[in-house]
Image: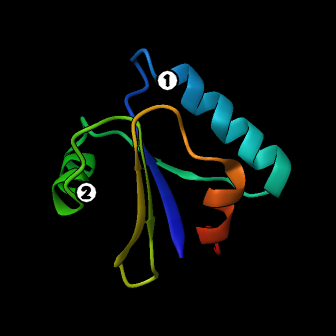
Amino acid sequence: MKVVIVYREESDHARPVIDFMRDFARQTGRELETIDPDTPEGAQFCRTYDIVEYPSVIATSDDGVLQNLWRGLPLPLINEVSYYDHN
């Protein structure tokens, strides 16, 4: 499974996302993938998973099936996300 955070770096919600990713890496030793919805690849990803609110945290299976989706702030707990992040 994999976890992706969709957010805009130049936005009001960037600081909480950056803090969350730093804390996640510190507690789990793993890095989370990020996607910018303003890039062509990011826009396609958002259309695929119907993401319209940022930040969003998406957990998918290895074959791309949606497992869980957290939208907006507050962000989920690190242990909730860690359960789905099996790289």
Label 1 element class: helix
Left or right? Give the position of 40 relative to 13.
Answer: left
Label 2 element class: helix
Q: Earlier in the sequence, mark 2 or mark 1?
A: 1
Q: Quadrant of residue 6?
A: top left
Quadrant containing the C terminus is bottom right
Q: CA separation, marks 2 and 1?
A: 19 Å
x, y percentage for residue 56? Answer: 40, 44
Q: How is the image coloured?
A: rainbow
x, y percentage for residue 55? Answer: 40, 36
Left or right? Give the position of 74 relative to 25.
Answer: left
Q: Residue at x 47, y 55 (%)?
A: 4
Which residue in the structure is indicated by mark 1?
Answer: 14
x, y percentage for residue 29? Answer: 82, 56
x, y percentage for residue 62? Answer: 46, 82
Tell me the kind of residue under disc 1.
Ala
Q: Residue at x 58, y 25 (%)?
A: 16
Crowd band around label 2 with a 10 angstrom C-alpha radius: few (<14), some (14–19), many (20+): some
Crowd band around label 1 with a 10 angstrom C-alpha radius: few (<14), some (14–19), many (20+): some
Q: Is residue 72 above or below residue 4?
A: above
Q: Residue at x 28, y 40 (%)?
A: 37
Q: Residue at x 28, y 37 (%)?
A: 53
Q: Is residue 53 above or below residue 1?
A: above
In the rendered structure, find residue 28 and report the number of the disc placed on it: none
Q: Are marks 2 and 1 in contact (CB under 8 Å)?
A: no
Q: Is residue 66 above or below residue 78?
A: below
Left or right? Give the position of 71 relative to 24.
Answer: left
Q: How many marks?
A: 2
Tell me the kind of residue under disc 2.
Phe
In the rendered structure, find residue 45 and report the number of the disc placed on it: 2
